[in-house]
Amino acid sequence: MGEDLFTNFDGRGTDLYHAALRFRLLRQQGFPVSLDGFRKLKNSEGRFKEWLSRDEQGLLSLYEAAHIAFHGEDILDEALTFATKNLKSILLTNKNISNAVQRQIDFALFVPAWKCVPRSLARHSLDFYSDQGALLQNQKLLTFAKLDFNMLQSYHKQELREISE
């Protein structure tokens, strides 16, 4: 299954984000995913390709995916080290990245998605995508997500009120 994750990988980083995201989501749901596709990210010397360090979104996705490693999966350990080092470097050098992306990287380095409470991650994601404004492709989906979050929060508050009475 891992090979399929990287079939569109074209060597420019355009699919690193999606391939790593697919890997992480499948792995989190318990599907067996091969690591073979990650070998395409390395050069002939066995190091991660240089251009990967310039793909902020791809690095962030790789960072999150590498956290879903099993014991003995050395390539994911190496990917985690590589991604962490480069994400920290991006924050320190303050490249031409938006404040929203900087906050997203900060948050991920502070608490990876798999360690985060789902509602807390949802709250952070809503804030992040709200800041994207015109860059966001589907405003209706964001509005729906906010409504869903607020309705569930309201439901939990009501339950808490009833329990505490």
Image: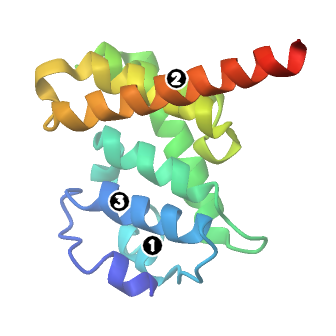
Q: Earlier in the sequence, mark 2 or mark 1?
A: 1
Quote the CA–CA distance across marks 3 and 1. 11 Å
**Can you identify the residue that label 3 sits on?**
49
The answer to which of 6 and 79 lies nearer the viewer is 6
| Residue type indicated by callout 1 | Phe
The answer to which of 4 and 56 lies nearer the viewer is 4
Indicate the secondary structure of the residue bearing disc 3: loop
Spot occupied by residue 100 in the image (x, y as percentages of width and height): 33, 19
Q: Quadrant of the C terminus?
A: top right
| Residue type indicated by callout 3 | Lys
**Can you identify the residue that label 1 sits on?**
38
Spot occupied by residue 52 in the image (x, y as percentages of width and height): 33, 51
Number of marks in the image? 3
Q: Could you classify mark 1 by the number of other residues whose Cα lies within 10 Å: few (under 14), some (14-19), or many (20 or more)?
A: many
**Can you identify the residue that label 2 sits on?**
106
Q: Could you classify mark 2 by the number of other residues whose Cα lies within 10 Å: few (under 14), some (14-19), or many (20 or more)?
A: some
